[in-house]
Amino acid sequence: QVQLVESGGGLVQPGVSLKLSCVLSGRTLRNYTMAWFREGPGKEREFLGVLRWSDGYRDYADSVKVRSTIFRDSTKNTMYMQMNSLKSEDTAVYYCAARTPWRATERPDDYDYWGQGTQVTVSS
């Protein structure tokens, strides 16, 4: 059984940076697609970025491309997302998701496994 566990959320002030983590357990990750999504208050789930586990290739949504970096630590089976210059509109529950095999898809329905989410609130 695949499990994803996010962490790193919290209450932060505008302008700061935050690093979210997603630990995957239960499978070897070689052929996996990993992704970050978020769901703001009253909004649909939004794709943020995708990572190809085998070689670390990543791609981002235009809305966060300039301010975000997705990367992985293979030794820890962990994916990260660093977000800089946080704004109030970044307030959301952030989810990581996984699927296999590799496919650079932005559609939530294409992902088979989801974490429980971590809340990020950006407020002064």
Image: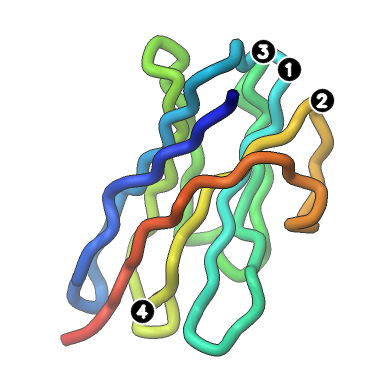
Q: Residue at x 27, y 50 (%)?
A: 8
The count of marks equals 4
Secondary structure found at label 2: loop
The residue under label 3 is 30
The residue under label 1 is 31
Crowdedness near tag 3: few (<14), some (14–19) or many (≥20) residues, C-alpha within 10 Å:
some
Secondary structure found at label 1: loop
Marks 2 and 4: which is nearer the front?
2
Going from the N terminus, do you reach mark 3 or mark 4 first?
3
Residue 118: give x, y in percent of width and height: 37, 58
Image quadrant in which you'd find residue 59: top right
Q: Residue at x 55, y 89 (%)?
A: 42
Mark 2–mark 1 Cα distance, whole angstroms, equals 5 Å
**Decide: marks 1, 4 in contact (CB < 8 A)?**
no
Q: Residue at x 65, y 78 (%)?
A: 44
Secondary structure found at label 4: loop
The residue under label 4 is 87
Q: Amino acid at mark 4?
A: Lys
The residue under label 2 is 101
Q: Amino acid at mark 3?
A: Arg
Classify 14 as above or below 1: below
**Decide: marks 2, 4 in contact (CB < 8 A)?**
no
